Image: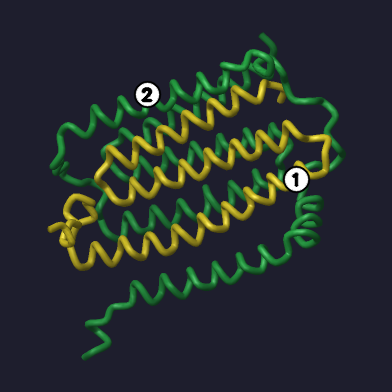
Amino acid sequence: MDVDLILFIGIGLIAVISAISMLASRNAIYSALFLVINFITMATLFLLMNAAFIAMVQVTVYAGAIMVLFLFVIMLLGAERLQSTRSMPWQLPVAILLGLALIAEVVFALFNDAANVAEGFSENVAQGFGSPTSIGRILFDQYLVPFEITSILLLVAMIGAIVITRDHRKESQ
Amino acid sequence: MNVPLNYLLVLSGVLFTIGILGVLVRRNAIVIFMSIELMLNSANLALIAFARSFAPAAEALRGHVLVFFVIAVAAAEVAIGLALIVVIFRTKQSIDVDQVSSLKG
């Protein structure tokens, strides 16, 4: 068993355990913090796969901005604990059963073809693969229009969030 | 890191399934939203793993660009979704998704 595999299994276990804890914890704030752990372990996995720029974006945007927004809304609403009002008690076992079936299907589909099971990544990676320079070059060279559309999307989301949360009762007075 | 691509895809699938279970099992709308983020992130993991497996080719970086767009769209989605949750809480005094059933016949 080589070092890479041990490293991968360790990081993968942390990711899966933090995801399950996110699902299982009753308090929504703990869920958010477990999700931050999950995102940071994912960022380390991205770093190990030569995706330096995406790893940094993951930490700043996901673990930083998005999760702070989540925590802010949870604390604003004071809705971290909900009394469970389960109207469909049969739903939980059915969901777990279907989830296990999906995992089994994924594992079967990926390991059915024995040819590429043991095949690792190729060692020769170009210098600067996944660096901000290379990503920026391909982004502004080939994907300029989608990039600009993304900026419009973010603008629309910003205006939409302000318009949706505006309090109409106060304005009519 | 030099592990087979299949292992990373299995990790991605497992995380995606946990996200699906979160959407199905939890009733708290904010936790459901976090599960959706988990699912998006597991898709990103698969994309990065594929990009790494095609690494010597220059086209492999397109996977990274796609992940970049997914992250941007996820940020927009979270802004709108949390605004909707705030409005639902203001009208219903609850973010339990079972309570939001006014349209049910």
Q: Have a look at marks 2 and 1 and say if they share a chain.
A: no
In the figure, what tint was chain B given?
yellow
Q: Is A165 drawn above or below residue A139 in the view shown?
A: below
Q: The numbered mark 2 sits on a residue in which chain?
A: A
Q: Is A159 drawn above or below residue A147 in the view shown?
A: below
Q: Residue at x 70, y 66 (%)?
A: A145
Residue designated by label 1: B61
- Of the 4 image quadrants, the one containing the C terminus of chain B is bottom left
Q: Quick one: A80 or A42, which is closer to the camera?
A: A42
Q: Residue furthest bottom?
A: A173
Q: Residue at x 24, y 55 (%)?
A: B95
Q: Quick one: label 2, few (<14), some, or many (20+) residues within 10 Å?
A: some
Q: Position of residue B26 (x, y in %)?
A: 27, 41
Disc 2 to disc 1, how far (Cα)?
Answer: 33 Å
Q: The numbered mark 1 sits on a residue in which chain?
A: B
Q: Amino acid at mark 2?
A: Leu
Q: Quick one: label 1, few (<14), some, or many (20+) residues within 10 Å?
A: many
Q: Which mark is residue A100?
A: 2
Q: Residue at x 37, y 24 (%)?
A: A100
Q: Amino acid at mark 1?
A: Leu
Question: Circle 1 — which element?
Answer: helix
Q: Is residue B90 left or right of residue A102?
A: left
